[in-house]
Amino acid sequence: MASNFWLVVGLGNPGRKYEDTRHNMGFMTADVLAERWSVAFSDHKGLALLGKGAMNLEGRSVKFFLAKPLTYMNDSGNAVASISAYYQIEPDHVVVIHDDMDLDFGRIKVKSGGSAGGHNGIKSIDKSLGTPKYARVRMGVGHARRGANAHDNTVNWVLGGFGPDQRKRLPEFLADGADAAESIIFHGLAKTQERFNGR
């Protein structure tokens, strides 16, 4: 019997050295949701920090789990699959929040299914869940200059921090990401896409 809980997963890398990096947009957005809905994280099988809460919006209450995988980005799927299986949460009740280099900083796109777009965390989740059919909140971080060392540039870019201008805009951007995750749960994908994807 599938659970009526939702699972919201913010992707990132554990550890202090990754704390304020572009690749940790998902963690940072999950922290906003945790604060908003008073979710306390505790350890889930060493695979993730996991908390449970209820979102109360528009007279409705929806129960959800909030997760920050501790597996490092490339194995995020292990954490997501473990939590989904343990609490019997179907992929259509999973929302994954992650950084996206194909979008400019501050832009958000919401989608379900489709390609992983070179994002190793998403590739890992697709594989572990056996489907790409879960909702994704893509948080734009812009991309590194393309050049001879494109791979190194990309790695340094996603593991790099934000400039002063972006840092100023970050709280509002993270709040938007949290809003988008809530909107998927309360209003569905299509309405959320209308609200966020065109900005």
Image (cartoon, helix red, strand yellow):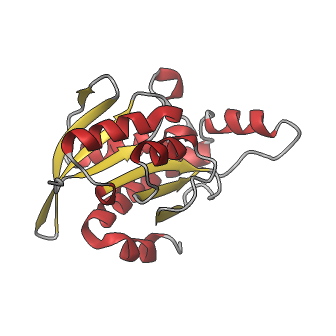
Give residue 85's position: percent from left, percent from top.
26, 41
Q: In the rendered image of this protein, does residue 40 appear above or below residue 26?
A: above
Direction from residue 199 to residue 177 in the image, left or right: left
Q: In the rendered image of this protein, does residue 84 appear above or below residue 102?
A: above
Q: Residue at x 31, y 36 (%)?
A: 82
Specify the quadrant of the image occupied by residue 92: bottom left
Give residue 57's position: percent from left, percent from top.
18, 65
**Residue 121 makes an appearance in the image:** yes
Residue at the right extreme, as displayed: 148
Direction from residue 128 to residue 114 in the image, left or right: right
Q: Residue at x 37, y 70 (%)?
A: 189
Say which of 63 and 199 sits in front.
Answer: 63
Give residue 152's position: percent from left, percent from top.
76, 33
Specify the quadrant of the image occupied by residue 179: bottom left
Q: Residue at x 50, y 56 (%)?
A: 138
**Residue 38 makes an appearance in the image:** no
Numbered-mark total: 0
Direction from residue 76 to residue 89 in the image, left or right: left
Q: Residue at x 20, y 48 (%)?
A: 37
Direction from residue 133 to residue 21 in the image, left or right: right
The quadrant of the rendering that contains the N terminus is bottom left
Give residue 190's position: percent from left, percent from top.
39, 76
